[in-house]
Amino acid sequence: MKKTQIAAAVLAAATLLIFAGCKNTQKDYILATGGTSGTYYPFGGAIANIWNTKLENMNVTAQATGASAENLRLINKGEAEFATVQNDVMDYAYHGTALFDGEVLENIMTIGTLYPEVVQIAVSKDSGITSVADFRGKRISVGDAGSGVEFNAKQILEGYGLSFDDIKKSNLSFKESAEGIQNGTLDGCFITAGVPNSALQELAFTAGLVLIPVSGDAADFICSKYSYYTQTSIPGGTYKGTDSDTPALAIKATLAVSSKLDEDTVYNMTKVLFENLDVLAQAHAKGKEVSPESAVTGVSVPFHPGAAKYYKEIGLLN
């Protein structure tokens, strides 16, 4: 009996050690996203779910935040390991420019870009504007002051030889910009967002709009100088009255990661994400726009070695 009790005690102790070992190997991470009413939060949740269900001992929590700039600071401070961010804002953070003037975040790296957020340039139907070059002297909203949209507008104007000094600039939200065009207090606006954008949809149904293209030498110049841009088009029919495709520039929603994470972990997480894009597409419509091929475009901040290993494995990086 005594031997039996001893054996049982040994077995119980061994079992506790096994469970303790399993608990210790669990990886708990934070994926910083955006506001609960936006795209980043549910999309980040879908990514976290893939990692949690497809990788053993993985526990990633999608956390609601103030979006790109805050997310990058969270990673840099070690308060999050992953984040969904705009690739242009990530570039600013890495190089200490624009929104991060003089503030360089050294602990951020790239897993890959996800889906495009298009710089949509809309003008009133009676403005007579057909090109960004026509913006001189016009009343143009460039998004909230200090926002990523404002920097997008500045860079695109630069491509056409213009600056904010050449326009009558307003800093308005997307909704306010659309209302300004509708009531005649604005000639045009810049909106950086997924397509379609609800404010522009409403404007198209009420007062109508014209989409202004960004293409040719201007687009090439902007993409060459600011490597986080990619060339795309807004499909005809996206907004009422726009029947033809409109050439445009896009920044990309991007999956950022802490440079402090080890190579094997990031490799496994990158691999399992891109091998389960069908699951991502079922969970969120934007998942249909994600692919390994597009994930290596619009990248200006270095890939994490684990992500780079995966892309090299499938022939997308040298």
Image (cartoon, helix red, strand yellow):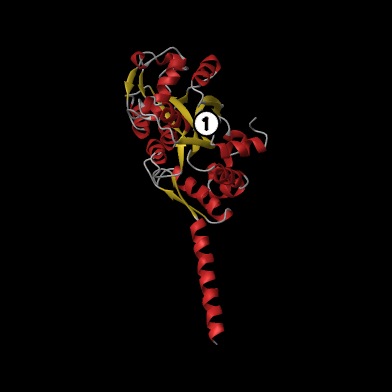
Q: Position of residue 173 (x, y in %)?
A: 34, 32
State the residue at coordinates (56%, 37%). Answer: 305
Whether residue 240 is situated above or below residue 45 in the rendered picture: above
Residue sitting farthest toward the front: 3
Q: Is residue 180 left or right of residue 221?
A: left
Q: Residues within 10 Å of mark 1 (few under 14, many from 20)?
A: some
Depth check: give the residue in front, 44 or 183.
Answer: 44
Depth check: give the residue in front, 273 or 267.
Answer: 267
Depth check: give the residue in front, 179 or 91.
Answer: 91
What quarter of the picture does the C terminus occupy?
top right
* Helix, strand or loop status at disc 1: loop
Instruction: Count how many numbered circles sit on residues in the image.
Output: 1
What quarter of the picture does the N terminus occupy?
bottom right
| Residue 184 shows up from this direction | yes
State the residue at coordinates (55%, 28%). Answer: 233
| Residue 123 shows up from this direction | no
Looking at the picture, which amino acid does disc 1 mark?
A: Pro
Which image quadrant is residue 203 in?
Answer: top left
State the residue at coordinates (57%, 38%). Answer: 307
Q: Position of residue 247 (x, y in %)?
A: 54, 24
Q: Which residue is mark 1?
A: 302
Residue sitting farthest toward the bottom: 1
Q: Position of residue 152 (x, y in %)?
A: 43, 25
Whether residue 131 is situated above or below residue 50 in the rendered picture: above
Q: Is residue 24 left or right of residue 170?
A: right
Q: Position of residue 60 (x, y in %)?
A: 48, 51
